[in-house]
Amino acid sequence: MIGATQEMSIEANVALGTPSWQASARPALSVVCTVYNEEEVIPELVDKLALVLSTLDFSSEIVMVDDGSTDHTLARLKTMIGQAPGLRIVELYRNYGQVAALGAGMSVARGDWIVMLDGDLQHDPQDIRRLVAEIANGHDLVATYRERREETNFRLAVTWLGNRVNRYLTGQRIRDFGSAYRLFSARLLDMMRDGFGYVHYNTPALYINARAGVELPITQFRRRYGASKWDLISLIQYNLDFLIHSKKITQVLLNIGMLGIFIGIGLYISSQVGFAEPARAITAPISIAFTSFLVMLLAVIWREVMQTQRYARGQPPFLIAGVWQDCGDGSPSLEAGPRFRSSGFAAIHQNVSAARPVESIDRHI
């Protein structure tokens, strides 16, 4: 299943005298984790990730994305360089939100497989081993569902409603669309990559384009530090991606339109047969409801138009200020500046994407 021309393990490269930075240039696995004002958890989080990855039989890297933190998160991350092998830090110019930050991390990630997880220690890094083990079963997407959640009743209710709506919109029988702990083949990112190599990450594209997915149960722990950065507006905007990618939305809109036509005909007939006053009484509320719906639909369309325009121009929803890594002596060095796209960064990633071998983790499982 795996050809002889595929990348060698990092141990084999070192034995042949290849420099360590070249040996790890193409890791088999990239762990992408976004953080925003999480300075308290950084040492423990990075240590746990490094410990788990050290037990795997293939090369890996940790891509930590600092989403414009205003505390000492970035400084804490830089102190971990040299202590955690393969650690790379993506510094964003300002705060863009978790979805955009994930896209930035995945644009920089070099692995054939991607693990994404939250950076607040609500996800157990030890579960990475369980996710990776599913690759041997032919899965290109290993998602998770939160079997146990230590969350507020409001968050649980919103998740319950969102999962049921999203199942209908996507046609995917997924238990938990909101669980951000996933492993997937980097090939799926090609469906989200623009012409300049940037990843415009969105969750429904993963589920829709995956060939063989599976869900594993996990426990999501309560936060020990800080507070969630998600609010009601953020949850609504996140779920709009499911609406836009839905194949059923056309049918839903047609049904609403037909309903409006029948209501209009019914009200007109009522006004002609002696029920003019009741008809006028309910006309105003119905008109307000349909007008509000059209305004909301216009907002969704405008959002999609703007995103499509950015995608076509190769303008990502984030600006990377720099990518930090170990310069060889345990101290952080700038791998790429804020204008790395003009220096051929995107072209390199396009070539890497086109030349990806068959998933190299399989042979270790």
Image: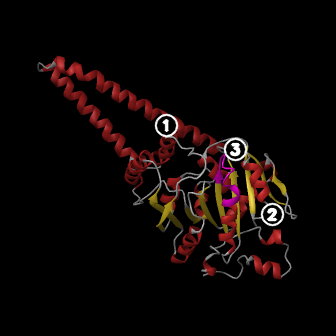
Kind of residue sitting beneath label 3 = Ser
Q: Position of residue 216 (x, y in %)?
A: 47, 67
Q: Secondary structure at mark 1?
A: helix
Residue 69: which numbered mark, if any?
A: 3
Residue with the mark numbered 1: 301
Q: Residue furthest left?
A: 273
Residue 282 part of the magenta segment: no
Position of residue 247 in the picture relative to residue 220 (left or right):
left
Query: Mark 1 and mark 3: span between their CA atoms?
Result: 31 Å
37 is higher (above) or lower (below) than 138: above
Between the C-alphas of marks 1 and 2, the distance is 47 Å
Q: Is residue 83 left or right of residue 138?
A: right
In terms of secondary structure, where does tag 2 sit?
loop
Q: State the separation of the CA atoms marked 2 and 3.
A: 22 Å
**Relative to 230, does residue 354 appear above or below in the rendering?**
below
Q: Quadrant of the C terminus?
A: bottom right
Residue 196 screen position, x and y as percent: 70, 51
Front-most of residues 36 and 28 = 36
For image coordinates 36% across by 40% down, the residue present is 253
Q: Are marks 2 and 3 in contact (CB under 8 Å)?
A: no
Q: Earlier in the sequence, mark 1 or mark 2?
A: 2
The answer to whether residue 197 of the structure is visible from this angle is no
Q: Amino acid at mark 1?
A: Ile
Q: Point out the stretch of residues depicted in magenta.
A: 34-44
Q: Which residue is mark 2?
A: 82
Of mark 1 and mark 3, the one earlier in the sequence is: 3
How packed mark 2 is, by other alpha carbons closer than 10 Å (few <14, some 14-19, many 20 or more), is some
Identified at 34% across, 25% down, the residue is 288
